[in-house]
Image (spheres, coloured by chain):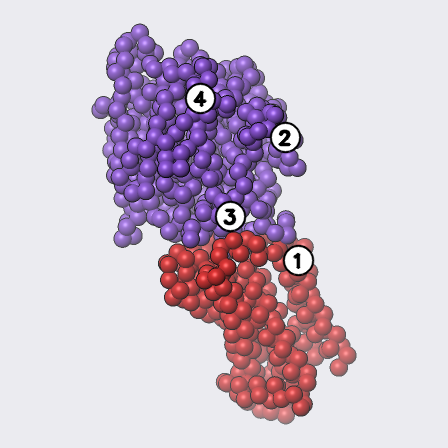
Amino acid sequence: MTMRPDPTFHASPKLAMEAPAENFAYTLLLSPDFSKPDALAVIDVKPGSPTYSQIVHTVTMPNKGDEFHHFGWNACSSALSPLAGHAFIERRYLIIPGLRSSRIYIIDTKPDPTQAKIHKIIEPEEVFKKTGYSRPHTIHCGPDGIYVSTLGGGGEDGTNGPPGVFIMDCETFEVLGRWEIDRGPQTRHYDFWWNLPRDYMVTSEWALPPQFENGIVPEDLLSNKYGHCLHFWDLRARRNVQTIDLGANHQMALEVRPAHDPVREYGFVGVVVDTTNLEASIWTWWREGGKFHAEKTATIPPEPAPKEKLPPLLQGFGAVPPLVTDIDLSMDDRFLYVSCWGTGEMRQYDVSDPRKPKLAGSVHIGGIARRTAHPNGKAFAAGPQMVEISRDGRRVYWTNSLYSTWDDQFYPEGVPGVEVMANVGRDGGLELDKDYFVSFPDGYRAHQIRLEGGDCSTDSFCYPSV
Amino acid sequence: MFDGLFLLPVGLDWGHASPALWLWLALLASGLYHGVNPGMGWPLAVSAGLMDKSPRALFRALWALSAGHFLATLLVLLPFAFLLVLAEWQRPIQIGASLLVIGFGVYRLIARRHPRALARIPPTQLVLWSFAVAVAHGAALMLVPIYLGLCQAFELDAGHEAVGALMKASLGMAVLVSLVHVIAMVSAGGCLAWLVYRYLGLRFVSRSWFNLDAVWAISLVLVGAVALAFNLAS
């Protein structure tokens, strides 16, 4: 307990943008063949620092085979919620779930990020016993604790019952139990986020564990068996109030990015692939007249490619699907960044008019067929994947791994972990920074990035920007 | 029911009834104290005003917060209003109430966690939220010793009146105490909310938010202890 709210808590997105820039980036490292323990890398991102763009500290876990994916803070600006009265906790602990093992690590980042260490380990059995869920994924700090989405239900293969969300205590990190009271038709899970003062949550769907753990199942994809629905929930009542089916051909609705300003009742979701034409799409969802709506507002076409440039999985199609695997919205809700992991492109859309995204910037790097090198000349395996934006919106960081077994199917030549950064112009436009290029130790791939003091996919707010 | 209203001027008469004067001042002070405490809800009024882009939403929220706080205070005072009918038991009642307040303060000092159930109240139900917060944090309980002291100062606990009249007077006093407290509270909280909304800006929300948990618990213990000391001395 502190005497004052953590200085990294901000009442509104605007105040968060005005706060001092990040000095460190935390990045999850995974060992794709499970031969080494997964790790958390702490990277110096302070311009001018002698160790700029280098790993300055690594926390290596005591187990193997966790498969790190997403992670999050124990507390963020949502602690300033006038309803919650929890303002006196620190943004201090990183909650890192093992997607494959269901083990959860709590990492203490104080007194200094370069001394980060393991604070607590929650063994998989506790998660199974208390929630009936498995394969924890997205972490958000919420009104009554830390919310964790899961991709699996009970049983060995995670198909015994639907996956969902569970809650952890934000101080003791005890697993408290399931969040849902009435899940309605929801049977798959992926990402989730919310609008706290408007009291709703949005969840998305990827797949059930047998559809992803050993790699993508092409027959399931072509028969549209991956997730394609958005679920809208009454946050405090914990009830599913509406489900919108995006259409079965819109396979894998992944990252949910609501506007940060709570006055704005809209957000975005990315769809990986349309099975009718290999297109990727961006959808805008919004609430109007008490109902939620969603429509496809941007599409990204596949790029034809000769068979010899394609992995066996794609050779029959003669084209590279863009594969939008992550999206992220800037703090001012102006730019949406879209990772095209297949074609090797990071797109920047101006979404000032949320239902009419306009392409404002783009950089090519990596890609199944293009294989564009970084401007510094170094190779960039795979394509842009997990993307994180600095609070001030001036820097966009990303890594290149999607998921161990999927990486191997789409990029059989291997995916050495890399993290790059692009600078954003005042009115849009993206340019890769020549000096920022982080290579990770051999045998490690890199997944999600979290920035010191909060970032654009962490903090949620209870006051509008004024 | 509102006989208590006529007692107010008497209480503010500087010439006599000085214990009553101090009690009225303590009541006003408790209202101001609860009002400026962000935990009792003024930031919600700021948020409401900003979300709806209208000062009217701010005042609507203040109204809801006051109603909830008033109901909580009244609910906690009512049992004591009924108990006062048992005139010959007034001393044990007062000592018991003081001990209750001290005990709750000590409990708040030890159990510092906020009740998680409060986080389940939707943002649209501000009256319920304010009511639940005031009950859960002992805001209403803090007023019990002041209320009992006022009843004693105006001899509502004296045995010379009929039970009916006594009841009417003690209930009236409970309503009056709750009203005065809530008016002081909403004045303080409302001023702060308006200043932040109109002039100071949202940065003030996090800058002004001090952890009052310990101070709050100690306030409960102090109020109870002062009341107990007076009761034991009299």
Q: Amino acid at mark 4?
A: Ser
Task: Identify the residue position indicated by label 3 in the image.
Answer: A10
Q: Amino acid at mark 3?
A: His
Q: Colour of chain B?
A: red
Which picture quadrant has residue A442?
Answer: top right
**Residue displayed at 51% across by 68% down:** B191
Which picture quadrant has residue B79?
Answer: bottom right
In this view, the mark in front (2 or 1): 2
Circles 3 and 1: CB distance less than 8 Å?
Answer: no
Residue that sits furthest to the left in the current view: A276
Disc 4 and disc 2 on one polypeptide chain: yes
Circles 3 and 2: CB distance less than 8 Å?
Answer: no
Task: Identify the residue position indicated by label 2 in the image.
Answer: A114
Q: CA distance from mark 3 to mark 2?
A: 24 Å
Secondary structure at badge 4 equals loop
Disc 3 and disc 1 on one polypeptide chain: no
Chain that appears purple: A
Q: Amino acid at mark 2?
A: Thr
* Residue A298 percent coordinates (x, y): 27, 33
Give the letter of the chain under mark 3. A
Q: Is residue B25 above or below residue B194?
A: below
Q: Answer with mark 3 or mark 2, whichever residue precedes in sequence.
A: 3
Q: CA distance from mark 3 to mark 1?
A: 24 Å
In the displayed structure image, the side of residue B207 where residue B63 appears, left or right: left
Could you say which disc has been placed on residue B214 in the image?
A: 1
Q: CA distance from mark 4 to mark 1?
A: 48 Å
Q: CA distance from mark 2 to mark 1?
A: 33 Å
Task: Identify the residue position indicated by label 4 in the image.
Answer: A401
